Amino acid sequence: MSAPSFDVGIEVAATRDGAGADAAALEALIRDVLAAERAADGSALTVLLADDEALRALNREHRGVDAPTDVLSFPAAEGEPFPAPDGGGGEPPYLGDVAVSLDQVARQAAERGLAFELELRHVVLHGLLHLLGHDHETPAEEAAMRAREESVLGDAIHAGAAGHDD
């Protein structure tokens, strides 16, 4: 049996002080997590790496919060279904979109004493887990999501972490 394939799009709409994110490393992380979570072969998603201004606009539009945030997830399974031609039979699932503020990631990394790339991997993973159905609305869900993040990135990822406000 061959390894599953996934369609991962990473759009870089902003850079952090000229230092771009390692899109190849993020794509590898996403593919590894999708495989570990047994996502359907051919599953697709898009990650937008943007700035505070873009995340503030998205946060205001979709959550009614007029402030930037680190990561927002837009699971395709939520909201109105997108009509597919001929009923969409056999099409691999589109999981949704993840939007990340590189500005906020840089601030959080500095506050927590983490490397920028590690914090970026953390917020992308957090957003991806939301697309895969994980949440943190209850203490039990929060503990499970935290454990899943730590199983991928190590427990140091939550050192000094206040959590995500999504």
Image (cartoon, rainbow, N blue to C red):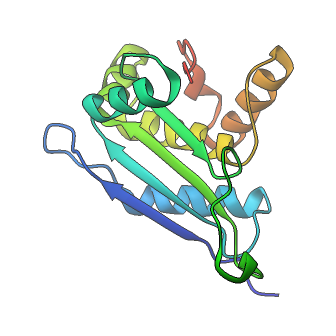
Q: Quadrant of residue 24?
A: bottom left
Q: Residue at x 76, y 58 (%)?
A: 36
Task: Name the one closer to the observer, 128 or 1.
Answer: 128
Question: Is residue 116 shown left or right of residue 141?
Answer: left
Task: Name the one closer to the observer, 125 or 9.
Answer: 9
Q: Quadrant of the N terminus?
A: bottom right
Q: Quadrant of the C terminus?
A: top right
Question: Is residue 55 shown left or right of residue 96?
Answer: left
- Residue 53, percent from left and from top: 25, 29
Residue lying furthest left: 18
As displayed, is residue 7 above or below residue 85? above
- Residue 51, percent from left and from top: 27, 35
Q: Residue at x 54, y 18 (%)?
A: 165
Q: Residue at x 36, y 16 (%)?
A: 67
Q: Quadrant of residue 130?
A: top right
Task: Name the one closer to the observer, 118 or 31.
Answer: 31
Question: Is residue 6 shown left or right of residue 11?
Answer: right
Residue 70 appears in the rendering: no
Residue 47 appears in the rendering: yes
Q: Residue at x 45, y 38 (%)?
A: 118
As displayed, is residue 3 above or below residue 134? below
Question: Is residue 150 shown left or right of residue 44?
Answer: right
- Residue 46, percent from left and from top: 48, 58
- Residue 66, percent from left and from top: 37, 16
Q: How many marks?
A: 0
As displayed, is residue 42 above or below residue 49? below
